[in-house]
Amino acid sequence: MIAYKRRLVQTAWARFSAAAHASLRVDYDQFRNDQAHWLEDYALFRALKAKYNGAYSLRWPRELVERAPSRLAEARRELAETIDQVCFAQFLIFRQGARLKAYAHANGVRLIGDLPFFVSADSSDVWANPEIFLLTEQRLPRFVAGVPPDYFSADGQLWGNPVYDWEALRRSGYRWSIDRLRALLSHVDVIRLDHFRGFAAAWHVPMGESSARDGQWVSGPGADFFETARRELGALPFIAEDLGLITPDVIELRDSQNLPGTRVLQFGFDGNPENPHLPHNYVPNAVAYTGTHDNNTTRGWFEALPEPQRQTLWAYLGREPGESREAAAELMRLAWRSPAALAIAPLQDLLNLGGDARMNVPGQAGGNWRWRATDEMLSPAEFDWLRKLAENSNRSATGSAAAESPELQETEVTR
């Protein structure tokens, strides 16, 4: 798919370059000017990647790794055609993103986007902004990101991303971070802040460790970051992904900023009535999921549950034990009828698919994101059921205040 789309971009670029396209050329030039603060470095990075056959940027000539001005100027002249084409591809993406957002709004739909907390070590972000990461003199990460042992992994998860120098970011007014938020908000209405707990503290693992066990929590920017973001953006249309090992400082930060947290029903049935993922413990300023992209499908999850936890689920529902094919619909009913302002279920749960339709396994590098929905799967019956569920739960477009409430675009998600 990537190769196919690259050929399309090359064809579009050839036609754009050969024809007059006066109005489009004006728009393109304006885009390059407006986005120059990140686009020019990104385009040069992509062009250098192509020149060096995809090699890790730290394996480029040392003058390029260290961004010697004369060497960068030479590379920009040498690779001008490739740089222009990369910028053109971004121009198309931004135009199409704006059209998608406008189309969604015209049809009563608002979009939630995801912002990863960390970035890749081999990225234009690190190459162009080494001062905001904790790196060695050779530009290698001093520490890498991950999480300690948790629900998903006995050894924790070693992600390998470089970690931030938050003091350097603070001195700049969090410019790079605010620019990321502003760029994504041009495409979506609400941002899900992945790994929200990193704003309170992140797990730093010394470079070279083979697992994430031997790390330490290092404080993040805390409330200062969000107060700066509010001054810059005017609002905080965020959802906090507050999953994993959550400590009191994370909860305090989330609540001090009035951000909706994340509740996942699949995490709720361990027999503890105080479990925050059980619906009777939800608050309105929350987003309820049956499961996320990191979980098994609900049917697959239920089929893998030990019998005592299955019994806990049926007891919570106040009904006689049922079959695995009933689990997804029951969890969707719980989410939709909960106090949470938003309720979300993966399409696999609406279609009642098993574990072979799972999207992602955290910590597993390959084999993920392979599942695809086909037209044949999308029968009207499931969507009629969903429509009735929304109506009966006061979540339909006509019956729910959340569909029109401006608060969703502010700091709090409200029904």
Image (tube, rainbow, N blue to C red):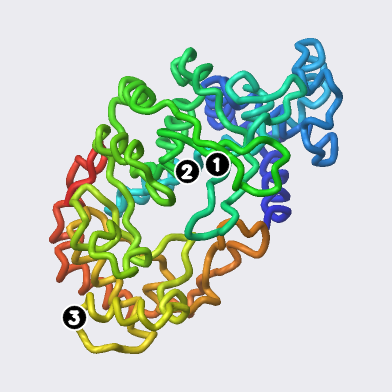
**Residue tagged by mark 3?**
318
165 horizontally vs 349: left or right: right
Earlier in the chain: of badge 3 and badge 2, it is 2
Q: Is residue 139 left or right of residue 363?
A: right
Disc 2 designates what residue?
Answer: 97
User: Depth-wise, is mark 3 or mark 1 nearer the camera?
Assistant: 3
Would you place residue 111 above or below residue 355 in this image? above
| Amino acid bearing label 3 | Gly
Which one is in front, 230 or 247?
Answer: 247
Q: Residues within 10 Å of mark 1 (few under 14, many from 20)?
A: few
Secondary element at image label 2 = helix
Residue type (three-letter) at the residue carrying disc 2: Gly
Compared with 336, 126 (above or below) is: above
Q: Secondary structure at mark 3?
A: loop
**Where is residue 118 shown, x and y percent of the image?**
55, 38
The residue labelled by disc 1 is 93
Residue at image coords 32%, 69%: 269
Dot 3 or dot 1: first in sequence order is 1
Which residue is drawn at the image coordinates 44% and 16% (left, top)?
173
Quarter occupied by the N terminus: bottom right
Mark 2–mark 1 CB contact (< 8 Å): yes
Residue 374 left/right relative to 50: left
Give the crowd class for mark 3: few <14, some 14-19, many >=20 residues within 10 Å.
Answer: few
